[in-house]
Amino acid sequence: MKNKLRSSFNTRQYMVSSDFEVYYYSDKNFNTLKPHAHDYYECYLFLEGDVTMEIFNSEGVASRYKMSPGDLMLVPPGIMHHALMNNPEANYRRFLFWISKSCCNRLMQESVDYMYLIQKAEAFHKYIYHMTPAQFHMIESKFLRLLEEVSSERYGSSAFIHLCLCDLILTINRIVYDEENMKNSSDELTLFQNIISYIEGNIEESLTLDDIAGKFFISKYYVAHLFKDTLGVSLHQYIIKKRLDECRNAITGGASITGTYEKFGFRDYSSFFKAFKKEYGMSPKEYQSLYSHNLIP
């Protein structure tokens, strides 16, 4: 199917259509184009070849990316770029998709979800993403379906082209969004586990919200939400439970109640008594006595 949908490369770097253009290219002995920019968005899916992509910032400084099969690039209007051929004799295959600013604006009126990748490119200057094999094949299938429909004259083609266009754009945005949010979730879980380990290792020390936020160089509000969202309790409630657990183990092991509550950070016996009774349904003395009584043969 790809050979039927293959386009002959044209050095033209402007759009004829007012909405979008899509191409599948397969070339050998490809001549490197001079650095250029467009007044539209360019989406590029790299399939095969020995290519380094060069992208320039606003000061004219270039960054180079050695392309691997499955790399996806999105370049906004005005960003200078070009592909460098490391080995011109290698077969150079890629999908290319151009979309005008006016078409993007119309899509944004339908849903801002179409604009995630574009907004990241413009706000954070991130242009290249690597797709896993499964992600790559999914995007490739969307490109092929759009190309096939554009080249056909079937009934309802105009309406179906719009559906294929939206499907391609949304699929790319969803893949990148999901991948980045999975990474954020992983980073968040690691942070949470590190905070838990720190609390357990320093349960006898001061463990205020400000202390922990300062230790991990993060906002105290972020710490508060992290505990509430992950455990359903506040940081303070978690620390109290951990301290009560340590106190219970100590007094049932024969330690004095007074020395224990002071050791594990309770200000006075009254606050310790209330928290202990609320957690275990009896006073520290009753708990200690009951446990000792159960140990007597």
Image (spheres, grey):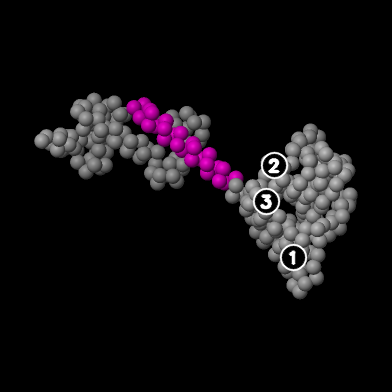
Q: Which residue is mark 1?
A: 161
Kindly identify the residue that appears in the image at 29 percent across and 36 percent down: 245
Kindly identify the residue that appears in the image at 74 percent across and 41 percent down: 67
Against 128, residue 198 (above or below) is above
Q: Quadrant of the N terminus?
A: bottom right
Closer-to-camera residue (3/279): 3
Question: What distance separates the C-alpha of mark 1 from that of mark 3?
Answer: 21 Å
Ranked by sequence position, the earlier of labels 3 and 2 is 2
Q: Which residues lie in the magenta part? A: 180-206
Kindly identify the residue that appears in the image at 31 percent across and 33 percent down: 243
Q: Residue lying furthest left in this view?
A: 297
Q: Would you say residue 202 sits in the magenta stretch?
A: yes
The residue type indicated by label 1 comes to Ile
Q: Which residue is mark 2?
A: 126
Q: Residues within 10 Å of mark 2 (few under 14, many from 20)?
A: some
Question: What distance separates the C-alpha of mark 3 from that of mark 2?
Answer: 19 Å
